[in-house]
Image: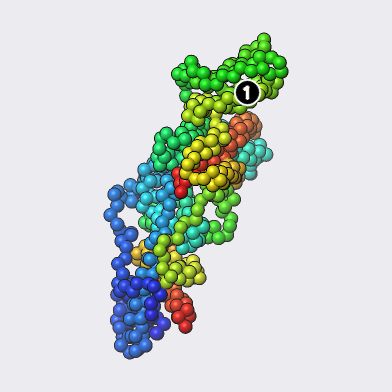
Amino acid sequence: MTCAEARIAIDARLDGELGPDEGPALEAHLAACADCAREVEDRRAFSASLGGALRRALDGVEAPREERARLVERLAAASRRRAVLPARLAAAAVLAIAAGLVAWALLGGPSAEQLALAEKIRLSRSREVQIERLQDEAQADLAFARESLASLKADDPPALVLNVGVSNLARQLSSGPPPPAPDRGSQIQRVAIATTVNGAAVELVQTGDGRVKVTLPHRTLDAPSMTELQRRHPDVCAKWSIEGNEGKVRVGKEAAVVELPARLDLLFRTGAWDDEVPWDAYRDWMQGRFNPAEMERRMKEMQERWRRAAESATVPVVTVDLEDVMKDVRGIGRQEADEAVKRVEEHMKALERRLKEMRELRGRAKGLRVYAEGVKKPE
Amino acid sequence: MTLDGAVDVLDPPRPPVMSEPAPRSEADLVAACRAGRREGFDELVSRHYDRIHRLAYTMAGPGAAADLAQETFLAAVKAFPNFRGDSQLATWLISILRNQYSLWLRGRRKWQLAPLEGEDQRQPAPEPRGIEKGVREILDRLKELPEDLRTTLVLFYLDGLKYSEIAQAMECPVGTVRSRLFEARERLKKMVQKSEA
């Protein structure tokens, strides 16, 4: 055994990893070599010191709790996606595999129709993955916002805002039908404005269930919410200077704003969400905590973070391998491939719409997260 | 010779990581994860996330540790159907982390282009509080070692893995683990001697 080999063996012995056959050779070397014998104690001390230093340096490195919670969400979502995608793919396009057509190999390769179909499927599959991924990310932010609620007093304005934001977003992310409109509140007038616009009398009433009734000369309009009124009748609203949103309305020169809890109630019932609301609530909540200049600085800073977060909600880059898709279209005949292409194109239109919607929701979820972070730890 | 500020403890206790009693067997955990059950993922994360995160921290630093650790688990979920159970989950996850790390280094990973949620608000993993000067130096010195030496050291000293387990995690022969540990210690020792001189 050479001295170099002996020193590696010394370390192995100190680590409790020296092989049974190596012991005698090491002992023999140590008996004959005073330098290596001296090394034993040095190496033991250094190893102990190194281990202690490493543990002290890294034992305190801890992953934040919320990272773990988000990770579990992402893992569950990734797992669902894996289960769902092949089935969707099959439903979307692979229609004629059972037709018993001539084997791929005999055809000598994919036909132009098969290639076109595979490319369409590849694109639609990429969109599906993008949508699912945005959805996962939004769900993770939503979970964070929900958790943050626990740290707030239920009647704090930020808690009310988070509640509304979380409920609305959850509803939109699930794409489920809106909950049945509660009839409670239909008798309460939240907003009532009677004024004159363009020399004519205009009246607007919003009731507690969110419904809006506008009385104009020779015409009456009715809508489930302010948002919906403006969406359905943009020209009428412009002509009679009607603007605003749930619980915060202006008609001509007259304006009405209901108190925050009532406004949040309206937002919740109508499913609308107005980014201005959190800042009203945030300002209320910070009253008395900081001096006005400091309060405004903090608010602007958080608003800016919110805005940046929402804007940076980019669509993830997803690449689906064409070869993987080709395996699924092999065996499909020309006519079947043409039909499948049409179906995939239809499917693709719906996917593009959903992607656009998801991107917006993703931005909102990010904003909600920023808000939750801000109100959770105001210092 | 000792490292500045480090406590000189002979025969330091090694944490029993690989064989700690589990609330349920690893096979059950793997089955739950394969089936996509949420409690399986919960358990997976609670058992393994800290270690993977800490290793990611030593590989890529505080800024990228969380992303790297999360991508490791996501890759594991995708790869669960291929996990045959001929290695332990802990070593399998470490080998995935090393693959993710090399992808991260090459900068070709898709998740670098696609920001993870809350990325712009996420704070880097905090450095341990109350860290002593000497201990901080060891962290700095560690950075100067190549990744394979650094990881071997961390797996041995912090995770308490045996040579054979490190070999499995790092997909190399046991003899390589032995020589890497020796090499890492020699290099650190030289650094210490240089700074003391």
Instruction: Check the image and report above or below for A368 versus B108.
Output: above
Nearer to the camera, A115 or A371: A371
Can the viewer see residue A267?
A: yes
Chain under numbered label 1:
A
Q: Which picture quadrant has residue A152?
A: top left
Question: Dot 1 surroundings within 10 Å: few (below 14), some, or many (20 or more)?
Answer: some
Image-based side of A113 in relation to B191, left or right: right
Q: Which residue is mark 1?
A: A254
Q: Nearer the viewer, residue B148 or A358?
A: A358
Task: Tell me what residue is drawn at x 69 percent, y 14 percent.
Answer: A200
Where disc 1 sits, the SS reads: strand
Is B121 placed left or right of A152 in the picture? right
Depth check, front residue: A299 or A23: A299
Q: Quadrant of the N terminus of chain B?
A: bottom left
Q: Position of residue A277 (x, y in %)?
A: 54, 34
Tell me where residue A26 appears, x and y as whole percent. 33, 82
In the rendered structure, the answer to whether residue A293 lies left or right of residue A24 reads right
Q: Write the residue at 42% across / 54% down.
A: A63
